[in-house]
Image: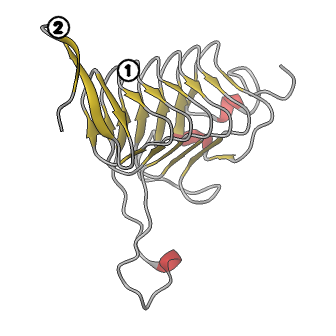
């Protein structure tokens, strides 16, 4: 695909790793500090996806990788994955369009200092194998999404979502879960 980034392109070779059969579709948007980003095999990152490690191009990050995307993932168009400390996306994770995943937030505690000048707390984010994030989902610092979790459209994930669950809302809460003994069951409030 003309203008796309793959493992054998000059831009693709700038990444910490870029798996065989993976692609970042054209047109691209913000992509920087690729040396702190790993992409697995057979992964497709849609057009207009922001993918970055750190705050500014050329920054030396404290961890490596900062962003790790597994094998056979699909990241929907217009999404953003903005890492500063650690974002780990497992294998076979798919997202809808316009999903935002970050491990850093903005401090606002001191009303005498502009928010842009306050501390920016960081907490690692993990998304387990086989999960799905619906259109417009936002994943915030410290979120831990388990394996085979479906997150409904426009949800905001701020905490932990256990394996084999369905979660929706702001903040996202579990509405269904699966176990070998009972199968899928609605959660009680």
Disc 1 target residue: 129
- 38 to 84, vertically: above or below: above
| Image coords of residue 182 (percent x, y) | 15, 10
* Outermost residue, right side: 2
**Tag 1 secondary structure:** loop
Marks 1 and 2, the one that precedes in the sequence: 1
For residue 180, the mark is 2
- 140 to 117, vertically: above or below: above
Task: Categorize mark 2 by other alpha carbons within 10 Å: few (<14), some (14-19), many (20+).
Answer: few
The reply to whether callout 1 and callout 2 are in contact (CB within 8 Å) is no
| Image coords of residue 113 (percent x, y) | 46, 87
| Image coords of residue 102 (percent x, y) | 47, 49
Residue at the image position 62 percent from the left and 34 percent from the top: 97
Task: Give the Cα separation between the discs numbered 1 and 2.
Answer: 18 Å
- 26 to 173, vertically: above or below: above
Is the N terminus in the top left, top right, bottom left or bottom right quadrant?
Answer: top right
Residue at the image position 53 percent from the left and 15 percent from the top: 72
- 12 to 107, vertically: above or below: above
């Amino acid at each position: 695909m003309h203008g796309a980034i793959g493992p054998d392109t000059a831009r693709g070779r700038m990444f910490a790793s870029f798996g065989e059969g993976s692609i970042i579709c054209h047109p691209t948007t913000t992509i920087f500090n690729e040396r702190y980003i790993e992409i697995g095999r057979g992964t497709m990152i849609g057009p207009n996806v922001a993918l970055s490690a750190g705050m500014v191009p050329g920054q030396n990050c404290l961890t490596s990788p900062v962003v790790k995307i597994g094998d056979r993932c699909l990241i929907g168009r217009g999404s953003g994955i903005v890492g500063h400390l650690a974002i780990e996306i497992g294998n076979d994770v798919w997202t809808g369009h316009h999903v935002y995943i970050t491990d850093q937030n903005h401090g606002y505690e001191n009303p005498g200092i502009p928010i842009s000048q306050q501390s920016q707390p960081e907490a690692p984010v993990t998304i387990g194998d086989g999960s799905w994030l619906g259109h417009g989902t936002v994943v915030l610092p410290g979120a831990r999404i388990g394996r085979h979790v479906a997150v409904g459209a426009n949800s905001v994930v701020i905490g932990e979502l256990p394996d084999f669950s369905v979660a929706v809302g702001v903040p996202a809460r579990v509405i269904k879960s699966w176990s070998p003994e009972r199968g899928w069951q609605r959660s009680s409030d």
